[in-house]
Amino acid sequence: MVTLPDQPLFPEKSRPALVWCRQALPWSETLSAPSINQWVETLGQRIVAALKDEQCPWALLLGPAVPEMNSVSPRRIALIEQGLRDWLKRKQKRLLKTLATPDIPTREACAILQVAWTDPTTAYWSYVPLPTVQAAGAALSLFPAGMPPIAEDHEAPARAFSKLMEAQQRLGRFIRPGETCVDLGASPGGWTWVAVQQGARVMAIDRSPLRADLMQHANVRFVKGDAFSFEPTEPIDWLLCDVAAFPQRTLELLRQWLGQRWCRNFVVTTKFRGSDGYELLPAYKEHLRSSGYEFQLRRLNANKNEMTSMGCLPSNEAGPEIA
Ligand SMILES: C[S@@+](CC[C@H](N)C(=O)[O-])C[C@H]1O[C@@H](n2cnc3c(N)ncnc32)[C@H](O)[C@@H]1O
């Protein structure tokens, strides 16, 4: 989606530059069409040609190339999508049977077809067959433009709630009823609130209290204290950590929790000040790689000058055991 200019993007002395990628469109081609009907015809033909020998499920990601720029209206996209379904019903009904619904676009099982509009009449088209989707892992998002839909929620104690919502979507794993969470740096309680809404039990650690309703909540135990010296006494399903701390401290905390297998899943924010701390990225990556956990290291759409480390124990490894 980015065309590189002839001149370097960044002057020599400020390299290396760090760019977080929200979505990739491998082997993309530019398509143009003047009307909704013409888009339906053009894309219908592309889809049929791409999937002519495929039996696997496929996900169709339609959206603006850069959501912030409103390059195409949601209504226009919805009309094109409906038109495409009708077109396929008439011309290639079998493909509708393998079209993944939003609930089952699993990375393990889907080819990914993307259309990313730069304006109403121009878009990038990309088709990625299943083996490449599997090899790409988290580098290829299952959401149009790499933006999981997060509904506004005015009941949440803090906007930070959206980080945990997004992290779960990106992981494709969700906190389940009855699971246990430790929320480090929990105040005022956005993440704790998400977890209890999903039926979990939460031990929330912070120096400041949570919002009053959460302090009273039957499934929340608040511990006033230091996130970095907290150690769990029983197996934990989710480590949630949004502590405001220097990146080196957060890395140490991750090392301890993952090294000791204290949690089965984790979502941990690292906060930067300006460009300070970014030099630790290779150490984060190296640690996560060697931890044995499956992981993603991303800048979430809900992140500011932050990144999120998240992951889980692989399914073939037993859950945490704590002496
Ligand atoms: C960004 S806020 C967390 C927001 C929270 N995730 C939410 O959704 O409401 C960071 C929190 O880290 C807490 N914090 C910073 N250092 C801490 C420490 N050493 N121990 C415990 N809490 C700490 C702060 O008190 C603050 O409440």
Image (tube, grey):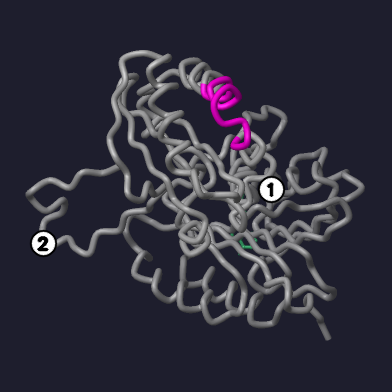
Query: Residue 223 location, x and y as percent?
Result: 79, 60
User: What residue sits 35% from the left and 26% below the top?
Assistant: 69
- Under mark 2, the amino acid is Glu
Q: Secondary structure at mark 2?
A: helix
The residue at which mark 2 appears reads as 12
Residue 67 appears in which quarter of the rendering? top left
Q: Looking at the image, is 225 positioned above or below residue 98?
A: below
Q: Secondary structure at mark 1?
A: helix
Q: Which span is picked out in magenta?
A: 84-95
| Residue identifier under label 1 | 191
Ligand 1 is in which quadrant of the figure? bottom right
Tell me the residue at 82%/73% (across/down): 235
Q: Residues within 10 Å of mark 2 (few under 14, many from 20)?
A: few
Q: Residues within 10 Å of mark 1 (few under 14, many from 20)?
A: many
- When the figure is inspected, residue 211 is found, relative to residue 8, above or below; the finding is above
Q: Amino acid at mark 1?
A: Trp
Left or right of 195 in this view: 78: left
- Asked if the beta carbon under badge 1 is closer than 8 A to the nearest atom of ligand 1, the reply is yes
Going from N to C along the chain, the mark reached first, 1 or 2, is 2
Where is residue 148 shown, x and y percent of the image?
56, 40
The one nearer the camera, 188 or 115, is 115
Occupied quadrant, residue 212: top right
Q: Nearer the viewer, residue 166 or 119?
A: 119
User: Which residue appears at 48% of the width and 64% of the height?
Assistant: 135
Q: Is residue 316 magenta?
A: no
Work out whether 228 lies above or below 205. Answer: below
Q: From the viewer's perspective, is the residue at label 1 or at label 2 nearer? A: 2
x 33%, y 36%: residue? 124
